[in-house]
């Protein structure tokens, strides 16, 4: 099983089981690297869009689906935060991938106390593969709830 990480503002995938991206290339890359059963870990950003208690924490994990999707085919525009649109009204995260099974980490663990190093910048807009065996073990040892 491969493990990937991405930064998020919260746990929106619990409501609608997709991971969204601003560029099709990020979805294509994930689907190229991931196979059935591989997982993506969601890490709260350090920005004001993330609830303070979730910033810098490993919030949850989900199995990666196998096909690209269009976010706006699945979510009504009225249900989205207006900050997710640019000045011209274009949605910033139009590309998505389905998620299958999902877990929340309770309690959410601080990233920097769990992993050996900070995530790379690619995890902000796309995904980063977690390759260090001790990091994978640490993530899989976190307490999970469905």
Image: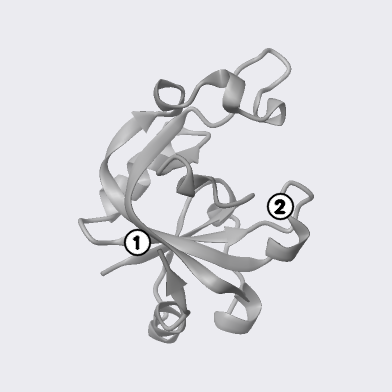
Percent across and percent down for residue 114 are: 56, 81
Packing grade of label 2 (10 A; few <14, some 14-19, many >=20) is some
Residue at 46% x, 22% y is 72
The residue that label 2 is drawn on is: 50
Q: Residue furthest front?
A: 146
In this view, the residue farthest toward the bottom is: 134
Mark 1–mark 2 Cα distance, whole angstroms, equals 22 Å
Q: Can residue 123 be seen here? A: yes
Image-quadrant location for residue 69: top left
- Image location of residue 38, percent across then percent down: 28, 61
Question: Which residue is painted at 54% across and 53% down in the image?
Answer: 122
- Looking at the image, residue 14 sits to the left or right of residue 29; the answer is right
Q: Is residue 36 left or right of residue 51?
A: left
Foreground: disc 1 or disc 2: 2
- Residue 83: numbered disc: none
| Left or right: where 122 falls relative to 71 | right
Which residue does the numbered mark 1 point to in the structure image?
A: 39
Q: In this view, does 113 lie to the left or right of 143?
A: right
Instruction: Please give the name of the residue rendered at 73% of the width and 46% of the height, measured from the top-left corner.
Output: 49
- Mark 1 and mark 2 lie on one chain; the one further toward the N terminus is 1
Splitting the image into 4 quarters, where does residue 45 fall?
bottom right
Q: Residues within 10 Å of mark 1 (few under 14, many from 20)?
A: many
- Image quadrant containing the C terminus: bottom left
Q: Where is residue 66 in the image (x, y as percent from the top left)?
A: 24, 44
Colouring mode (rainbow / by chain / secondary structure / one colour): one colour
Q: Nearer the viewer, residue 25 or 15?
A: 15
Q: Is mark 2 on a helix, strand or loop?
A: loop
């Amino acid at each position: 099983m491969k493990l990937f990480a991405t930064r998020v503002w919260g746990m929106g995938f619990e409501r609608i089981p997709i991971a969204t991206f601003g560029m099709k290339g990020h979805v294509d890359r994930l689907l190229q690297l991931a196979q059935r059963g591989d997982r993506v870990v969601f890490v709260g950003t350090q920005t004001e869009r993330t609830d303070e208690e979730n910033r810098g924490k490993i919030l949850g994990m989900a199995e990666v689906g196998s096909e690209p999707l269009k976010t706006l085919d699945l979510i009504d525009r009225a249900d989205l935060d207006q900050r997710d649109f640019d000045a011209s009204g274009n949605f910033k995260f139009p590309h998505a991938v389905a998620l299958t099974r999902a877990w929340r980490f309770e309690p959410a663990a601080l990233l920097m106390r769990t992993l050996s190093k900070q995530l790379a910048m690619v995890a902000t807009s796309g995904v980063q593969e977690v390759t260090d065996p001790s990091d994978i073990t640490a993530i899989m040892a976190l307490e999970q709830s469905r």
